[in-house]
Amino acid sequence: MRVVLAEDLFLLRDGLVRMLEAYDFEIAAAVETGPELTEALASLEPDVAVVDVRLPPSHTDEGLQCALAARRARPGLPVLVLSQHVEQLYARELLADGNGGVGYLLKDRVFDADQFIDAVRRVAAGGTAMDPQVISQLLSRRSQDKPIGGLTPREREVMELVAQGRSNAAIAAQLVITERAVAKHTSNIFGKLDLPPSDDDNRRVLAVLAYLDRG
């Protein structure tokens, strides 16, 4: 699996390269600036891009804007974003096209190699990998804009886990309830949010995130 990596800090970039190679990823390019990232994504057509939000020369949202432009040119290009903070506008923009193959991880909350590698693989396969804190803040912001369908506290907990890409079994294990109870909660959630129900994990995630991104 071919990866384009964009990270301006040398030690972190080198560490990510070594980690990915140890798990049999091929590093198509490891770059440090926005223009280099744009060129690499256009010319190398990787299986997945791992991108820091803030890259030179602007050190604002250069990395994410390059990734978004690449996804417009190549719809569905898998992109895993790394950031120091929850950038709500950036996260919502990344998720807005609803094609899947997206992730948003906070750097200081990636606790081990397996967690990171699982996220890269999930995104490369067209799934989602969202940090729980990112989801929580998106939900919080959406609640301030407009109440989320009158969800109960338990339904809100379930929705956060659904939006992270968790299966019914994983949600049941975390909340210490039955899978049948999870299925009932998700059915209620989709009904209250006027979203089409789905048993496909990625489609469920995208349905919830599409709702979060509305006006």
Image: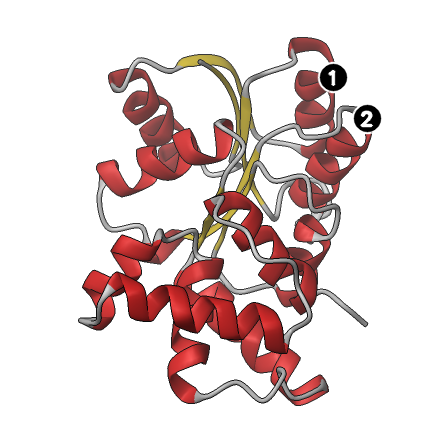
N-terminal label among 2 and 1: 1
Where is residue 18 shown, x and y percent of the image?
A: 30, 22
Marks 1 and 2: in contact by CB < 8 Å?
yes
The quarter holding residue 114 reads top left
Image vertical order of residue 177 relative to residue 109, above or below: below
Q: Helix, strand or loop at disc 1?
A: helix
Q: Nearer the viewer, residue 161 or 36?
A: 161
Residue type at mark 2 is Ala
Where is residue 29 shown, x and y percent of the image?
A: 54, 15
Q: Residue at x 73, y 47 (%)?
A: 58
Image vertical order of residue 48 relative to residue 196, above or below: above
Disc 2 target residue: 73
Where is residue 4 shown, x and y percent of the image?
A: 54, 22
Disc 1 target residue: 42
Q: Nearer the viewer, residue 124 or 70?
A: 124
Where is residue 155 shown, x and y percent of the image?
A: 43, 79
Pointer 1 local density, CA inside 10 Å: few below 14, some 14–19, many at least 20: few
The quarter holding residue 21 reads top left
The quarter in which the N terminus is drawn is top left
Q: Residue at x 30, y 65 (%)?
A: 180
Mark 2 vs mark 1: in front: 2
Q: Residue at x 68, y 20 (%)?
A: 41
